[in-house]
Amino acid sequence: MVETHRHDVVIVGGGAAGLRAAIAAVEADPNITVALVSKVYPMRSHTVSAEGGAAAVTREDDSFEMHGYDTVKGSDFLGDQDVIEYFVEQAPKELTLLEHWGCPWSRNEDGSVATRAFGGMSIKRTWYAADKVGFHMLHALFQHSMRFDRIVRYDEQFVTRLLIDDGQVRGVVALDIRQGTMRAFLGRSVILCTGGGGKIFPFTTNGNIKTGDGMALAYRAGVALKDMEFVQYHPTGLPGTGILITEATRGEGAYLKNKDGERFLVTRDYGVGSKAELGPRDLISRAMVQEFEAGRGFSGSYGEYLHLDLTHLGEEKINQRLPMVRELAKVYGGVDPVYEPIPVRPVVHYMMGGVDTDIDTATQLPGLYAAGETACVSLNGANRLGSNSLTECLVFGARSGEQALQFSKGADDGNERAVRAQAEEEQARIDQLRGKVKGGEKLARLRVDMNKTLESGCGVYRQEDSMQQTVRDIAQIKGRFADLALEDKSKVFNTELVSALELHNMLEIAEVVANSAASRKESRGAHTRRDAPTRDDQNCLYHTLCFFDPAGPRIEKKDVTLGTWVPEERKY
Amino acid sequence: MSDVQIKKFVVTRFDPDKDEVPRTDTFEVPCQSDWMVLDALNFIKDQLDGSLSYRWSCRMAVCGSCGMNVDGAPTLTCKSPLSSYGDTVEVTPLSNFPVIRDLVVELDGFMEKLKAVKPWIIRAKEKAVEEGPYRQSPEELEDFKQFSLCINCMLCYAACPVVGNEPDFIGPAAIALGYRYNLDSRDEGASERNAIFRGEGSVYSCSFANECSEVCPENVDPAAAINQAKLSGLVDWAASLVLPRGGKD
Ligand SMILES: Cc1cc2nc3c(=O)[nH]c(=O)nc-3n(C[C@H](O)[C@H](O)[C@H](O)COP(=O)(O)OP(=O)(O)OC[C@H]3O[C@@H](n4cnc5c(N)ncnc54)[C@H](O)[C@@H]3O)c2cc1C
Ligand code: FES
């Protein structure tokens, strides 16, 4: 028998978005409870790794208009402008709330919150807590959430399926990782806050848990994934590990240099204009790849790289503003940035796409909401600006908590028997997969093959034949997944089983990324085709929707919400 | 890639479904010179034995998942280069915690202790969001910043001789995190927390071993927090004898 737990709202994910959603829901109504279901303890969520900052209009000389325009332009005009306007207006309030909840934001001498420069932002509007912003935000949110007994945590529960009855979501079913049994979490609404899926790529800033689970859950339940072709490469990852060196280094004045010691973003025309190192990520990553192709990169044991030079900033500033960068560079890069440049190369960082939601974070499936990196509310369009996504987690996390609660109040519990039956079915499926010996495919092998083909087909530069090859490869690897052989038959903390479920999810979204990419016949933001190098607003100013279909992913189009800002050439 | 060296890993295994007591498995791993201990465990899991269980995620020393004892010492495995170990490396679960399986330990006890110290801003009257952020000078921030850097990796509990003997002891990380709020200029909850520090599992159990601060991978220095909490708890307690309750903390 699957154990069941009932709450008013079920939230999957305990990162910035999930915690914010939970707090918003319990604050909106003193009589409700929420389940916070997460595959890791909330403070392990990958929000913890964010380094650079969170954006909100703060200074007198800044305006919503400017933050909005920067975001629209950064998105290569694919962001929905109503969403962007709502976002920039809510952002200051949300960061202030975090301040009231104890987040140790860095300060100016007069005690006001300090702001720093960030890529693609025309003014200093990024709040920071040294260079451990995600860490501090996550722990502040988590610790603040502990004051609410009505946020009921279920830690180390891996959600495997949405429970749906009568066209409405009724809860989720999860593998209790510690016990190996299944639990059903029933609620009249569900919010997915499960983060991104960078682990589909081989070289990424993302941690091991970022496997796109929520996207796969929604997709299998018939909800579209939107704009999945847009995968952000961050310009500065450490070769080998992919550990991020935050954009805040460049915000604080660091230079990118090629092997001739040249600041190529200044000396050559890569479209970043006077922004130089503070141009948007898509443009800089492409510039770096072009430097490699022109033979101006360094070569090392992990491939080509360039230099990120902080030496002119001085030890004091580095220690004060970028202590984590110094530590990371020393421990994982083998250099002390006070004295030597850091070797860096572009690295997969963030998925602009995700579960298709409207401005209220609602999906097409009644009762299902999504927020944070797993969602695509269409704030980021074709290219996210650094420091917008932590704020996005707060703004739309809060919105999802309120909206899901509203829905919950107007909905009934549905047919609990039918829902329980689905949970039992799921139990049987998981029991079959655990320690399954039939077949000869190894988990690690399939993961590596998936990683490789995605990088070759859906990397910084793309073209028709390689994208099509990746589409075929992924379909083939999905077939091989059926022959997966597992060795661990134990119920307790079976991480092999969890990895298999995660791989299954990753293959699903990898297929969506590849198919969405192949369907877009232009270059826009992070989606850059060598065989279609320009943006085509005439034919391609649309969101890509990808639907699950037993016959293979089905692509549809959705209009972009325009408004104040008319698409223009994206020049900096 | 870099040079490869074969190292032997002696790893604790325990599966409550099968084992009465923990046992060990030995694996030979071709280690690259720039690998961390965690990289070797991942190699074992991917190539040699898919059933080995341990936690990890960020591999950049910030999520706090990957603490284990390596050659007997509490260690953040994603931050510890294999080059600093010999040809044989022993990996066991963190001490002082119940073991769930292999290298995975039970953390729920810590989560309760953390909650018990009220790690959130307490104020008589909360400020409305419309009023904007509190002012806090860089110096005021410095007062508590260090204690806020705890990643909850639990190395300090594994190292602490008191936690081993007195499971109820609130312990280094939770005290540091609670005390961090006492030091925050925005907070007014010090006397509430001091009462907790003086209560069951109190700060006075601490025997000044300082092991916690020595193993802390983030230099949080929980021992300093405990010492300060002891003092402020006492001062507070003494004051409560002469003053009626309810004054400003
Ligand atoms: C290295 C790095 C640096 C970054 N720096 C910045 C920055 O400076 N500024 C900025 O704005 N953005 C930054 N970002 C992006 C930003 O940090 C993320 O987009 C954001 O933190 C995502 O938060 P989230 O709450 O959506 O998801 P996460 O924090 O990833 O949380 C996901 C949650 O979902 C849970 N979960 C997932 N799957 C399941 C499942 N199947 N069952 C149960 N639970 C599940 C997990 O346990 C976790 O709790 C950075 C990202 C990285 C990787
Ligand atoms: S894996 Fe996150 S701290 Fe080691």
Image (tube, coloured by chain):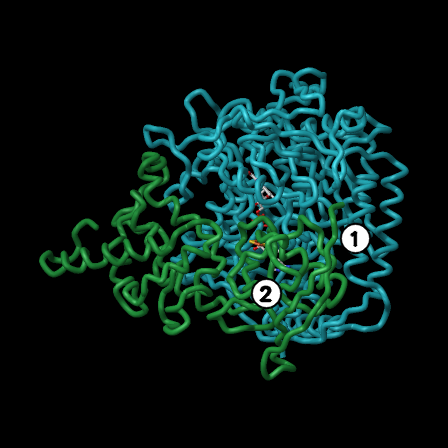
Task: Write down the residue under mark 2.
Answer: A157
Query: Element under label 2?
Result: strand
Q: Nearer the viewer, residue A49 or A69?
A: A49
Looking at the image, is A382 positioned above or below residue B184?
above
Query: Which three-letter amino acid code belongs to the residue tagged 2?
Result: Gln
Indicate left or right for A332 with A431 as reference: left
Task: Label the green chain with its letter.
Answer: B
Q: Residue at x 65, y 69 (%)?
A: B10
Q: Is residue A140 visible?
A: no
* Near-viewer residue (B192 or A33): B192
Dot 2 alpha-carbon crowd within 10 angstroms: few under 14, some 14 to 19, many 20 or more:
many
Give the left or right position of residue A230, taking residue B73 as reference.
Answer: right
Marks 2 and 1 on same chain: yes
In the rendered view, would you say A47 is above or below B117?
A: above
Residue nearest the observer in this picture, A149 or B86: B86
| Residue drawn at (85%, 34%) of the image | A463
Marks 2 & 1, CB-CB < 8 Å contact: no
Amino acid type for the residue under numbered disc 1: Val
Give the cyan chain's letter.
Answer: A
Residue name at image x 68 percent, y 76 percent: A490
Q: Is residue A535 left or right of residue A400?
A: right
Number of other residues with Cα within 10 Å of mark 1, as a class: few under 14, some 14 to 19, many 20 or more: some
Q: Quadrant of residue B118?
A: bottom left
What chain is tagged by disc 1? Answer: A
Label 2 lies in ligand 1 vicinity (Cβ under 8 Å): yes
Q: Which residue is mark 1?
A: A448
The residue tagged with tag 1: helix, strand or loop?
helix
Question: How many numbered discs sit on the rendered protein?
Answer: 2
Instruction: Judge by depth and name the residue closer to the eye, A487 or A22.
Output: A487
